[in-house]
Image (cartoon, rainbow, N blue to C red):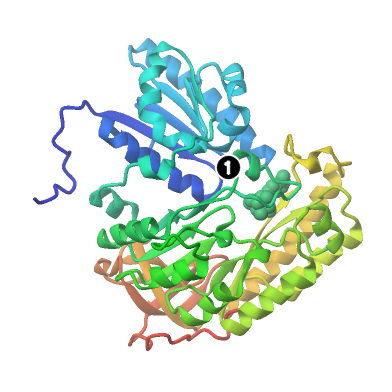
Amino acid sequence: MTESVGSPAPSMTPKRKLYVKSYGCQMNVYDAHRMADTLAPAGYVETATPDGADLIILNTCHIREKAADKVYSELGRMRVLKQNAAEAGRQVTIAVAGCVAQAEGQEIVRRAPAVDLVVGPQSYHRLPEMLEQVSHGKVIDTEFPVEDKFDHLAAPSRAVTRRRGVSAFITVQEGCDKFCTFCVVPYTRGAEVSRPVEKIIAEAERLAEAGVREITLIGQNVNAYHGADAAGRSATLGRLLHRLAEVPAIARLRYTTSHPLDMDDGLIAAHRDLPPLMPQLHLPVQSGSDRVLDAMNRRHTRADYLRVIERLRAARADLAFSSDFIVGFPGETDADFADTLRLVAEVGYASAFSFKYSPRPGTPAAEMAQLSEAVKDERLQRLQHEIDRHQAAFIARCDGVTFDVLFEKPGKKPGQIVGRSPYLQPVQVIAPSNLIGEIAPVTVTEVGSNSLFGALAEASPAPGHRPVEAVGA
Ligand code: 5AD
Ligand code: SF4
């Protein structure tokens, strides 16, 4: 049987338009795809704008106050859209998914009555039946069901996978047992659960067959992965990466987000032994002060973190690091903050995210004495300045270097295509569009503030060749 790429599937189900807007982390992007895949058999086809959509899903993030606030202002706009549609005789269903749905449940419908359906992250496989119930009144599901949602979520068709591009995510682990005192994740995503190895391999093979070349394994605490292997034994993330490196056509592997405590020997060795494992690692530290790390319940010291970085660099010299930082955590003194600035300089991050501490209801740190906004603002500015300095230094070191680029899509200008460097930077190159989906060596000829410009290099570097030893900071 041949597949009808680009033409509608023969079906009696009337077509309905689905618009999903995702906030926050990459897991929400993955979940959004899986929700769309699960609704496809009911006739839902994704659209890029909310206008004209029959079903609107806001896939929300609760990590900081600002993220949650955005949802309520977006819901205000959606209410108007729903009203206008109703006046024109068209029914629009509004659903709230993600971590705000999990944390606030019923409260969302109280504050935003235009919402028809609230669904927590563990119940996405129940969406089709929930939608059927919407005509009878509001539907709210924030359970942590016993069945594994991954067994019930539909897989995308080959054509849909291809449209989503050459780089894909796979959720391998969800939830967190660490309970950092600032973080809502253990409450909204629940306890750590790892998917079995064989199911992940099957998903990777399916993606590879549809043209995917790069896979990023995602999980709130991805390196705590401990999924069962075929023999029923618990496998580490290092083991899983070894298995994935054998999947034909998968040329690049990444994983995010990791906790420093869970960087075990096997995972560190994987960075030495697996050429497809890209030399870029997001390893959040949050603070450079032992006092603050302790108050955050991070369970590691500054020295522990620096030792992990050192061991990773010993395993792979061209590794570049990124991190997350929180400034203005309750009790953070000037001296604590100075420790954070020193850590940034000591590690020399290629990039980093920094946030003002935001009290999350129900978390221990929200009950502690808070610092003023003015102090947080000032520290955030200083930290961002320091991070920018290191980011600029890193990108400047990329000038003139040749590295492999995975081409993803047409570029900004005619004749240009754009891909990603091993360090995830976008690289614009004048090159034929048939290179999209391929990996080719590129010499960087110009650097921007976050992107690179280059020209195709003559020959492909030898397998396992690391031409950028000088780049990893
Ligand atoms: N306030 C500010 N930043 C936070 N993060 C998590 N919780 C909070 C909070 N309450 C940040 C951390 C984490 C990233 C995803 O978001 O730095 O690593
Ligand atoms: Fe949140 Fe990460 Fe800490 Fe887990 S390890 S509680 S996800 S910050």
The three-letter amino acid code for the residue at tag 1 is Arg
Q: Quadrant of residue 197?
A: bottom left
Could you tell me which residue is drawn at 59 percent across and 74 percent down?
320
Residue 431 visible in the picture: yes
Residue 314, percent from left and from top:
62, 84
Residue 47 visible in the picture: no
Dot 1 falls on a residue whose secondary structure is loop
- State left or right for residue 111 relative to residue 242: right
- State left or right for residue 298 relative to residue 161: right
Residue 190, percent from left and from top:
59, 42
Q: Is disc 1 surrounded by few (<14), some (14 to 19) or many (20+) residues within 10 Å?
A: many
376 lies above or below 56 = below
- State left or right for residue 261 relative to residue 31: right
Residue tagged 1: 189
Nearer to the camera, 259 or 86: 259
144 lies above or below 440 = above
Q: Quadrant of the C terminus?
A: bottom right
